């Protein structure tokens, strides 16, 4: 009896070793590339925060115009998010993700040539239309390759590209803004949009070669390796048959509750991203390059924090508290950043807590939808959650811009954003644990 038990344990250990090697192989194939794609996406999405430092004076835009223009991106994103992911499910992630990247790259070039508020609004809206479906499309793609017991760490690795884009994008944007002023008759903010579009176009072309829709189509996997992944995903899908159609995603109260929670998380994230350079400049840091380097501190911290948070979530098969606690810490960080400290170090500490916690909340959050959605429901449900959640990208940035113009004090609006993060924590904790924690 003991011998049989030992033999079985040895066989299980050997199988787990092979299984780990298979998923490592898939992760090395996809995660570095998808990280680069996500970095490119966020550069094109948030570089307007650095362009703002010069663009507003050149074009005589108010903070209200900037806030509305920065936020209207999300209107286009939201309207076309679900249709985009439905098409992704039908056409395949490989082709559709490539299409998204190439189209947003072309439109991002137009940002360099806007002259009026209306042109600014139109191009930002079209940029949102072009990018719609990218994030949930990538999440759906990863759910077709990695089962739930590995998905948290995989998502954390992939989503580390969000803070990484700021770690790289801050100094890069600062360097471009400092070095390209009036080169070739263009202002530095125009060069910022032109140069930071190049990665999107290059990666969009490479996506066709790198991405593979399913393990069955991967020529670089052996038949045994394909079977291991397919068996794992098949067992997981069998538990989720009640949530496998487009209609079931829209009928699910959990999907709608997750959407509201994500609205709260994203509100904090984008306010931090779009307004961090401004908050740092208020401490007398006038050099754009220096501002760029200072913004890397919160995001480098975020990369480390989100990985360990999600590794813990995978290890304990628990998702809600690993999302809710970071939401609470985000609220604390945003609230502290609203206080006008005399010390730049204290403001950076508050921004670091806010950025790291928001990143942890976002990455842990996206482990939950694939826990109960599969197939068409996963494509539609994740798109719905992301689209409704990203409405906050428009609402929060526009609100902060308007309050800043009305009061001259952007810190006041941050207390409201802090409250939203707390509401997000409550919504997450009220979710059914049995459905999401595995």
Image (spheres, rainbow, N blue to C red):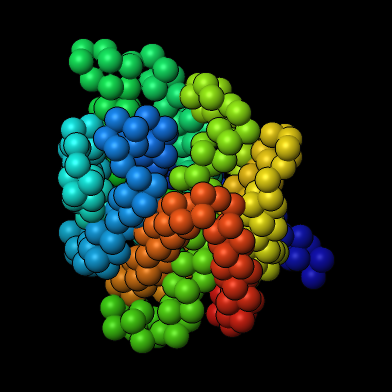
Q: Nearer the viewer, residue 41 or 53?
A: 53
Q: Considering only vertical position in the picture, is 220 above or below 248?
A: above
Q: Nearer the viewer, residue 311 or 410?
A: 410
Instruction: Name the spot of residue 383 as percent of width and height, x first.
Output: 34, 66
Q: Determine if residue 62 is in view.
A: yes
Instruction: Name the spot of residue 165 as percent of width and height, x first.
Output: 46, 36
Q: Determine if residue 300 is in view.
A: no
The part of the image, by quadrant, that contains residue 143 is bottom left
Q: Nearer the viewer, residue 31 or 427?
A: 427
Q: Residue at horizontal 73%, vertical 37%?
A: 342
Instruction: Name the spot of residue 344 as percent of width and height, x first.
Output: 69, 34
Q: Residue at horizontal 42%, vertical 57%?
A: 402
Q: Residue at horizontal 32%, vertical 28%?
A: 189
Q: Nearer the viewer, residue 364 or 425?
A: 425
Q: Residue at horizontal 60%, vertical 47%?
A: 355
Instruction: Name the spot of residue 275 as percent of width and height, x first.
Output: 50, 44
Which quadrant: the N terminus?
A: bottom right
Residue extending farthest front? 407
Q: Considering only vertical position in the picture, is 149 above or below 344?
A: below
Q: Considering only vertical position in the picture, is 294 above or below 39?
A: above
Residue 368 located left or right of residue 381: right
Count numbered badges in the picture.
0
Residue 249 located left or right of residue 367: left
Which quadrant: the C terminus?
A: bottom right
The part of the image, by quadrant, that contains residue 13 is bottom right
Residue 418 located left or right of residue 264: right
């Amino acid at each position: 009896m003991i011998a049989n038990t030992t033999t079985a344990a040895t066989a299980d250990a050997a199988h787990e070793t092979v299984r780990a090697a298979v998923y490592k192989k898939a992760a090395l194939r996809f995660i570095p590339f998808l990280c680069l794609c996500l970095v490119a996406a966020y550069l094109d999405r948030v570089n307007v925060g650095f362009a703002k430092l010069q663009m507003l004076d050149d074009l005589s835009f108010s903070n209200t115009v900037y806030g509305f223009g920065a936020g209207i991106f999300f209107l286009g994103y939201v309207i076309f998010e679900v249709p985009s992911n439905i098409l992704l499910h039908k056409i395949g992630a490989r082709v559709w993700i490539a299409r998204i990247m190439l189209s947003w790259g072309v439109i991002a070039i137009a940002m360099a040539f806007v002259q009026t508020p209306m042109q600014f609004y139109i191009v930002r809206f079209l940029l949102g239309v072009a990018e719609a479906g990218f994030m949930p499309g990538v999440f759906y793609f990863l759910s077709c390759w990695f089962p739930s017991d590995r998905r948290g760490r995989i998502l954390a690795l992939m989503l580390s590209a969000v803070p990484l884009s700021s770690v790289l994008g801050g100094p890069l944007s600062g360097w471009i803004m400092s070095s390209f002023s009036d080169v070739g008759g263009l202002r530095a903010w125009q060069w910022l949009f032109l140069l930071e579009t190049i990665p999107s176009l290059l990666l969009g072309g490479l996506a066709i070669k790198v991405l593979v829709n399913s393990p069955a189509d991967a020529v670089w996997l052996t038949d045994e390796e394909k079977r291991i992944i397919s068996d794992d995903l098949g067992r997981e899908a069998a538990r989720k048959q009640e949530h496998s159609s487009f209609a079931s995603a829209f009928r699910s109260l959990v999907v709608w509750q997750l959407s509201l929670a994500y609205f709260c998380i994203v509100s904090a994230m984008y306010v931090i991203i779009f307004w961090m350079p401004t908050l740092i400049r208020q401490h007398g840091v006038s050099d754009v390059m220096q501002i760029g380097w200072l913004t890397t501190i919160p995001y480098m911290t975020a990369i480390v924090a989100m990985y360990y948070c999600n590794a813990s979530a995978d290890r304990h098969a628990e998702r809600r508290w690993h999302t809710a606690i970071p939401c609470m810490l985000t609220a604390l960080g945003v609230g502290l950043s609203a206080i006008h400290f005399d010390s730049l170090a204290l403001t950076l500490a508050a921004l670091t807590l806010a950025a790291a916690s928001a990143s942890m909340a976002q990455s842990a959050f996206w482990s939950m939808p694939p826990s109960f959605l599969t197939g068409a429901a996963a494509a539609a449900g994740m798109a719905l959650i992301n689209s409704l959640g990203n409405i906050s990208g428009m609402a929060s940035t526009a609100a902060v811009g308007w309050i800043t113009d009305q009061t001259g004090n952007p810190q006041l609006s941050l207390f409201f954003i802090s409250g939203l993060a707390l509401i997000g924590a409550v919504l997450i904790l009220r979710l059914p644990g049995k459905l999401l924690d595995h």
